[in-house]
Amino acid sequence: MVETAVIKRLNADEGIKAAGLAAYGDVPESRPTRFITVERVGGSSGRIIDRPLIAVQIYASTRSEAMKLAETTRMALMRLTDPTNLTGLAEIAAVDISGVTNYPLDETTPRYQITAQLAVHE
């Protein structure tokens, strides 16, 4: 599952760890102040290559902080194609960032969203 591969790679990324972020598939029940969620929202799938469209949402306590953390996360997403010592994960061959957008959950919950198209070898 591509979400699992992206979440595990993000959580192993030094930039993400240095920013005090953690990635999840769903919003955690005991919601941290800052965190990332990853979900597949579309894309196409073939016999050998999967082309998922993912939405990566970055939550923080202020819009300014969410924007900065979105940039940190964008850079980490670009590193998804780097070799890793994580085993059993799909190989991510390409990452194309479609957009980084201010996407607040509501009037009091700052959030940015990154959409990205991946090429994944299954």
Image: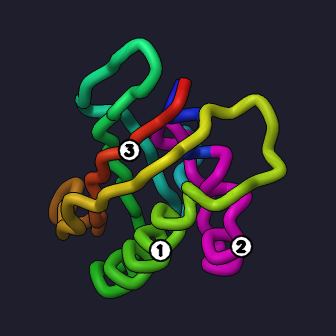
Give, as a three-letter code, the residue at label 2: Glu
Residue at 38% x, 73% y: name it: 70
- Say whether disc 2 or disc 3 marks the residue closer to the N-terminus: 2
- Measured Cα–Cα span from mark 2 to mark 3: 21 Å
Q: Is residue 42 above or below residue 22?
A: above
Q: Nearer the viewer, residue 120 or 8?
A: 120
| Residue of label 2 | 14
For the rendered model, the colour scheme is rainbow
Q: Which quadrant, please, contains the N terminus?
A: top right
| Residue of label 1 | 75
Give, as a three-letter code, the residue at label 3: Leu
- Say whether disc 1 or disc 2 marks the residue closer to the N-terminus: 2
Residue at 52% x, 31% y: name it: 121
| Residue of label 3 | 118
Q: Nearer the viewer, residue 91 or 24?
A: 91
Q: What kind of element bears circle 2?
A: helix
Name the side, left or right, on which 53 lies relative to 13: left
Q: Is residue 6 above or below residue 44?
A: below
Q: Is residue 119 above or below residue 113?
A: above
- Measured Cα–Cα span from mark 3 to mark 1: 14 Å
Mark 1: give few (<14), some (14-19) or many (20+) Cα within 10 Å. some
